[in-house]
Image (cartoon, rainbow, N blue to C red):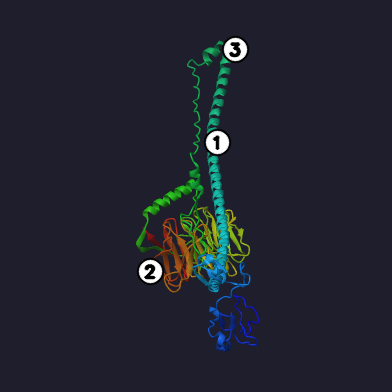
Amino acid sequence: MAHSKQKIPGTAQHFLECGTEDCEKNCEFYCNSCHQQMCKPCRDQHLQIAENKNHEVVLYQQRRRQLPVKKCKIHPTKEIDIFCKECNIPLCSKCSTLQEHHGHIFTDLETIYTEKFTLCQTELSKIHNHFIPTSQDLQREVQENATEVKQIMDSIRTSMKAEAESLKNMVDTFLSENMEELNQIEKSLLEKLKSQEKTFDDYIAYLNDLAKEFQSYLSSTELTNFTTKLPENLEIKSIPETTKPVTPEFSPAQYSKNDVAKLSGKIIKSDRKAELRRVKSMEIPPIATSMKSTSEKTKLDKHVKSDKKQTLSLSASVTKVREFNVPGVDDVHHVSQDQPDRLWISDQNGNLIQTNLQGNVIQKIETSGTSEGYHTVTQDRGLIFTDEIKKVINRITQDNNITEFIKTGDWEPLSIHSSHINGDLLVGMMKGRKAKVTRYNKTGKELQNIQRDNKGQGLYNLPHYITENINGDICTSDYNKFAVVVVNKSGQHRFSYRGQGLLFHPYGICTDVLGHILVCDDDSYAVHLLDQDGQFLSLLLTEQQGVEDPCSVCVDDENNLYVGQLKTNTLTVYKYLK
């Protein structure tokens, strides 16, 4: 039989032909004795030959590998084809008869070669099919994680700079107020001293006039001036009393680096230890910053709120306090508290009304807003609202003029919330099918963009209502995502709440002094109550309590809950904390 027409590599995966000359059938078998690949008919013919009847013919996949031809250095006419197990070396058959190998155990070198060859092939397959692709995937994830770490760190740096800037502004404000107070004290003291100075001017003038009168008497030769004109009981007015001004003192504050850290915030390092994993990608430990306001008023407010928080708890039942109609709106899609006795209310037709708690309209603004939380009241009681058509954020000045505050470029601003913690603006935006939340500081400088989770997936679809919790979490009501999406201050996804039924269409959202999240659901016609970690607590208000179609919620400084609904301009006030 002729041998194969071509050499087939050991790792070949392509079509194999029979090795018999002029036979083009598929190769199925292999003769380990003569190292020939053959088809089934050629195998049968091969074994019918007398000298081949003891040949070992196996399936091609089970074949033994043919030894590379290598001549023995001691016996050049012999090929190396056996293996000495004692000496652990390959030999030729003649070497095995030498004295130094007497009594040794020998084995077929081709068998060992085949085993080793198969082992190498198996390990090579593992390297190419598993280890290299897996390592490359992990390497890409490490690179992605490095990019994400940089983004998170940049976001934290931005937040830290914003907090530092806020702290500087508060220090400047505090200094300005103290300077103004000092100037007023100085003015008052100088006015008193000037009054005293005028008193002495008048008194000295009086003394000079009196001295002139006495001098005239002394210069006169007329005795009658002494006897008749000069009073006998002459008494000079006493010297006016003076008061020394009491000036204020300045008491320098005693503070340390730790005190500054408490005011401006610090980096909180993760406690989790790094884990070694073979296949899963490396996760980035959460990094958060804790920031605090610094003004004395804010400290006092926080102290009062902290005291309230310690004494407040959920009531066993919800009590309706009052309700009133708001003229000028068709429904109540969003509510923002202005002053303690004033609210801003909007409907789906762009009407934005300022009203008192009796329902009397104070002012009205025509906007492009619809069914979103598109307005908010800032720390200094200013109104800010979005215009998604013009892609700007407007604010109303103290003289009631509307001015453009922030231009949002290609992004349409939908929802907005002014932080009670530091005055930052949180804005839910859309661009085509993309959505994000952007943070601006009080001056309108862009600080942060939140768009994807740590797996690169989009966090938002339609962020049409937005608020902030007491721990700095950003809570977004996303209608098209059927979820309330909550991220921490650094923009890392904490949780998503998807309701209690088959469908959940969240509308208006707010938080309270205890960190509860309250959100309206367009499907269950209820107001859901969650804790700050996203755990469902209860359906706070339902149809059984007269709430037919809630779409807006707001909790004021006195913990009153305002609920607005579709198809009615009635605003209802409840108590749910005790």
Which residue carries the number 3 mark?
A: 219
Q: CA distance from mark 2 to mark 1?
A: 61 Å
Quarter placement of the N terminus: bottom right
Quarter placement of the C terminus: bottom left
Query: In percent of the image, x 45 and y 71: which residue is there?
Result: 549
**Secondary structure of the residue carrying numbered label 1:** helix
The image quadrant that residue 214 belongs to is: top right
> Marks 1 and 3: in contact by CB < 8 Å?
no
> Marks 1 and 2: in contact by CB < 8 Å?
no
Give the image location of residue 233, x and y in percent.
47, 16
Decide which of tag 3 and tag 1 comes sooner along the chain: 1
The correct choice, above or below, for 472 with respect to 296 in the image is below
Q: CA distance from mark 2 to mark 3?
A: 105 Å
Give the amino acid at mark 1: Lys
Which residue carries the number 2 mark?
A: 545
In terms of depth relative to the viewer, which is nearer, 271 or 260?
A: 271
In the rendered image, the residue lying farthest to the front is 99
Closer to viewer: mark 2 or mark 1: 2
> Marks 3 and 2: in contact by CB < 8 Å?
no
**Secondary structure of the residue carrying numbered label 3:** helix
Is the residue marked by circle 3 packed among few (<14), some (14-19), or many (20+) residues within 10 Å?
few
Which residue carries the number 1 mark?
A: 187
Give the image location of residue 405, x and y in percent.
60, 57
Give the amino acid at mark 2: Gln
Decide which of tag 2 and tag 3 comes sooner along the chain: 3
Give the image location of residue 391, x and y in percent.
61, 64
Residue 448 visible in rendering: no
Give the amino acid at mark 3: Ser
Is the residue marked by circle 2 packed among few (<14), some (14-19), or many (20+) residues within 10 Å?
few
Is the residue marked by circle 1 packed among few (<14), some (14-19), or many (20+) residues within 10 Å?
few
Q: CA distance from mark 3 to mark 1?
A: 47 Å
Decide which of tag 2 and tag 1 comes sooner along the chain: 1
